Amino acid sequence: MKAAVFHSPGKITCDETEDPKIEAQDDVILKVTSTAICGSDLHMYSGGIPQARPMVMGHEFMGIVEETGSNVHGLKVGDRVVVPFPIACGGCFFCDHDLPGHCENSNPDMYGPEGGILTEKGGGMFGYSDLYGGYNGGQAQYVRVPFANTGPRKVPDHLTDSQVLFLTDIFPTGYTGVMWGELKGGETVAVFGAGPVGVMAAKSAVLHNASKIIVIDTLQYRLDRVKAQTGCETVLWKNAKDTIEEIRHLTQGRGADLCIDAVGFEPERNIVDRVKATVNFEKGSIKVLDACFSAARRGGRISILGVYPVNYDNFRLGQIFDKGLTVKAGQAPVHAVIDKLLGYVAEGKVVLDDVITHRMSLTDVAKGYEIFDKKEDGCVKVVLDPWK
Ligand code: NAD
Ligand code: ZN
Ligand code: ZN
């Protein structure tokens, strides 16, 4: 089959690889009909998330069941499904507590309670390095889906792939950022990042009846799009100080009730940021997260959706304490929210496919990564067709 294979940072190519096989009796093999490139994939592309051996990329995918193990209930050959990006057994302590990203059974070699940098991670993920289970991903013609009694969700025939594909990751992720904010309606939400995750967070803030949504990015074209899609206000990030001032100005001087970090550890960085990271043995920068702490009101909330893979010195604990902030972070618990969100899509309460700017063949995946990474050609989201 054809698949997008990670070889080394900056090198992901469409190669001919082995077809996946059923390995456990609760696996299914999925014929992938649509797959997308995620901002998280860019952290592997940059080398920020390390990976030594080649592997098939991709954790945003959907398709048609091609083959089932003998112990798969509720799915049959021909069913059309979307698949949550965390791989979760459905039966362990964490799965029982709606924390599929922390599943005790899907990442046996690397799993542990410590949450270390290169060891003791959480549950497995598709196509996301050996740290997360070493599973091949779905930027491919076929993919093995383990624990298939737990993850895949059937989707109604009348909804197109583009309408439901983002239920695998970015919509549940953006939604989770808002859900963690425990909004009651009428709040102000500041979303840092107008990439696919930030856009979905802004859409989710609309669903939660936020009274004001402010989206911040360094790229004007992304701000223009999200403003047209959600009616949000926008702030073009030039530096942290001005951005924070502008957000305070828009929130009666207090700051936002909820700040969502949808950027992560690889924001736009200047030379000072790069030197700081080298001196502190850190990866990337936490400047966007710092801005979230400053731009949140006293007693406010912070949702960290953007990925931070290591620990950072000068973390603003004193500010968090003084302002009484509540901080939540981590992988989105997709399994816990996907059914509700599929309902929203089916009812037409939310539109997801307007985030797509590029549709390409899987054979052009190298180009897809390049333009998404460099934010070229007005790119926000690349969807790949494995069969064209
Ligand atoms: P993306 O790279 O397209 O989006 C990041 C955005 O941040 C870009 O638009 C970029 O211009 C903007 N940005 C850069 N510097 C900035 C700054 N100083 N201030 C404001 N904005 C700035 O990627 P994405 O797909 O939207 O993903 C965003 C983050 O979310 C990534 O770190 C990704 O790994 C993470 N993610 C997390 C989960 C989860 O479950 N928690 C799921 C999916 C993605
Ligand atoms: Zn993702
Ligand atoms: Zn589990």
Image: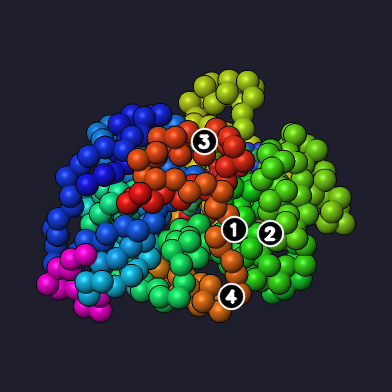
Query: Callout 2 environment at 10 Å: few (<14), some (14 to 19), or many (20+)?
Result: some
Q: Quadrant of residue 174?
A: bottom right
Give the Cα distance between marks 4 and 2. 15 Å
* Residue drawn at point x = 58 percent, y = 35 percent: 376
Choose the circle earlier in sequence order: 4 or 2.
Answer: 2
Element type at marker 4?
loop
Name the residue carrying label 2: 229
> What label sits on residue 371 in the rendered view?
3
Name the residue carrying label 1: 354
Position above or below: 216 against 231: above
Q: What's under tag 1, amino acid-wise?
A: Asp
* Residue drawn at point x = 72 percent, y = 67 percent: 210
Name the residue carrying label 4: 348
Choose the circle earlier in sequence order: 2 or 3.
Answer: 2
Element type at marker 3?
helix
Q: What's under tag 3, amino acid-wise?
A: Ile
Give the Cα distance between marks 2 and 3. 22 Å
Answer with the quadrant where ligand 1 appears in the image: top right
Q: Foreground: 236 or 275?
A: 236
Q: Is mark 3 within 8 Å of ligand 1?
A: no
Q: Main secondary structure of the magenta part?
A: loop
Q: What's under tag 2, amino acid-wise?
A: Gln
